[in-house]
């Protein structure tokens, strides 16, 4: 099997943020060690064991909420099952509030070579409203500690269109992020996911978000400031110094194979029965119990049909600046011409790329082509 991307899900967080719909749990104590051991056992028993890893990504949750001992042990188990390729990117997400010099040094020594810091905002009032456990001052400290530990590939996550946020506030956040000089920026518009506290507050009229025109202005500002600072926009929400594009996420966007381990982890593999997407049991205790009993871990699985694969390729490929390879997709010429007339796409040598205006309508373009 060709090298694949590997995802390890650590589901624990200090608190559950009001906007978050990820598979995360505010749990501490012995359950963390129990689940970490269960993940190691899942990895060791994987049918893809022995397949090299081109990228490894520890997400969550907050991986750095685990002890250095658990984190490094998990990475060793992953590397034993999936020998890294020479250029393997090994990332861990990190909350600035859990940044620790000794932990970062241990992680770097174990083989992690990239950190993704969930900054979200440089304003303490935003962070409090979002339910984040860190303060703005801790973001700069986390970057400093990561550099001191030897990390030369850092990402900052920022969110815009936050409750009460102005365009000027967002500009200030962007400028501070750029000043820190990280190699990568992920800049996401806040989305109200169903059944989150933020969604419920919004429906009740207690949470007001910026108007859509201001959200558009914020996005365009991000694109301009990032470009002026030397970042290349290689995906709708992601910007990197040349050569520092996130290889792991590119595997997702290019519809490549990836193995997922841990509670709620998702994988997409070419199994003997055909391409399959699966999701592990989500609750940490249920997951650990299933591993300990030798029971099936998947709570969901889907055999991917040719039409599934086609739609996925369109939906994800359009997000990339390199564009969508139209070969073999049987796209409607009428739909393509309509999108060109609206100046939402351009066609170049078999590739379909979103224009700057089209990036605001990515979902609409995808639906028109599907």
Image (cartoon, rainbow, N blue to C red):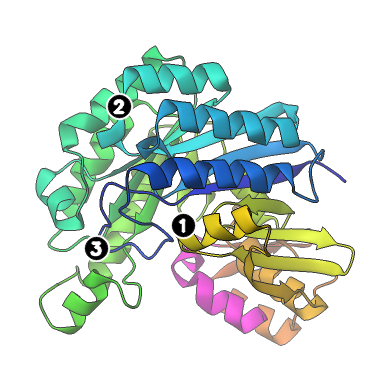
Residue in front for this viewpoint, 208 or 78: 78
Q: Which mark is residue 18?
A: 3
Residue 308 x, y percent position in the rendering: 73, 77
Residue 160 x, y percent position in the rendering: 28, 56
Q: Considering the whole magenta stretch, tell me its main secondary structure.
A: helix
Q: Are marks 2 and 1 in contact (CB under 8 Å)?
A: no
Q: Which residues are magenta?
A: 355-370
- Is residue 337 something that shows in the picture? no
Residue in front for this viewpoint, 163 or 195: 195
Q: Earlier in the sequence, mark 1 or mark 3?
A: 3
Label 1: which secondary element:
helix
Q: CA distance from mark 3 to mark 2?
A: 23 Å
Depicted 237 relative to depicted 313: above or below: above
**Pointer 2: what residue?**
142
Q: Quadrant of the C terminus?
A: bottom right
In the picture, measured across the screen, residue 346 lies left or right of residue 235, that is right
| Residue sitting at x 58%, y 22% | 111
Asked if the magenta segment contains residue 369, the reply would be yes
Would you call the spot at circle 2 few (<14 residues within 10 Å), some (14-19), or many (20 or more)?
A: many
| Residue sitting at x 14%, y 57% | 129
- Residue occupying the far front of the picture: 293
Would you call the spot at circle 1 few (<14 residues within 10 Å), some (14-19), or many (20 or more)?
A: many
Q: Earlier in the sequence, mark 3 or mark 2?
A: 3
Label 2: which secondary element:
helix
Q: CA distance from mark 1 to mark 3?
A: 20 Å
Residue in front for this viewpoint, 45 or 142: 45
Residue 178 x, y percent position in the rendering: 32, 32
């Amino acid at each position: 099997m060709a090298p694949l991307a590997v995802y390890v899900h650590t589901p624990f967080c200090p608190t559950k943020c009001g906007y978050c719909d990820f598979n995360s749990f505010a749990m501490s104590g012995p359950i963390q060690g129990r689940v970490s051991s269960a993940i190691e056992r899942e990895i060791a028993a994987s049918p893809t064991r022995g397949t090299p890893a081109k990228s490894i990504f520890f997400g969550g949750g907050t991986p750095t909420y685990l002890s250095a001992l658990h984190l490094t042990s998990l990475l060793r188990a992953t590397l034993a099952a999936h020998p890294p390729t020479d250029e393997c990117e090994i990332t861990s997400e990190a909350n600035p509030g859990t940044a620790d010099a000794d932990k970062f040094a241990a992680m770097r020594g174990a083989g992690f070579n990239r950190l993704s810091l969930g900054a979200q905002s440089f304003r303490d009032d935003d962070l409090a409203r979002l339910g984040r456990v860190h303060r703005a001052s801790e973001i700069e400290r986390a970057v400093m500690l990561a550099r001191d530990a030897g990390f030369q590939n850092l990402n900052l996550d920022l969110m815009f269109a936050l409750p009460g946020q102005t365009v000027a506030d967002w500009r200030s956040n962007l400028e501070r992020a750029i000043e820190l000089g990280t190699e990568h920026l992920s800049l996401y518009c806040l989305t109200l996911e169903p059944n989150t506290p933020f969604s419920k507050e919004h429906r009740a009229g207690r949470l007001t978000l910026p108007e859509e025109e201001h959200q558009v202005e914020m996005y365009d500002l991000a694109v301009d400031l990032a470009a002026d600072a030397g970042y290349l926009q290689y995906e709708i929400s992601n910007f990197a110094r040349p050569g520092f594009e996130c290889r792991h996420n590119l595997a997702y966007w290019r519809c490549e194979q990836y193995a997922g381990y841990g509670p709620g982890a998702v994988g997409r593999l070419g199994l003997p029965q055909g391409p399959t997407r699966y999701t592990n049991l989500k609750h940490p205790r249920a997951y650990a119990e299933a591993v300990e009993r030798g029971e099936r871990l998947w709570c969901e699985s889907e055999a991917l049909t040719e039409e599934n694969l086609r739609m996925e390729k369109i939906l994800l490929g359009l997000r990339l600046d390199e564009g969508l390879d139209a070969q073999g997709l049987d796209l409607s010429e009428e739909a393509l011409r309509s999108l060109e007339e609206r100046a939402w796409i351009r066609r170049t040598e078999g590739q379909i790329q979103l224009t700057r205006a089209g990036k605001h309508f990515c979902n609409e373009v995808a639906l028109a082509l599907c």
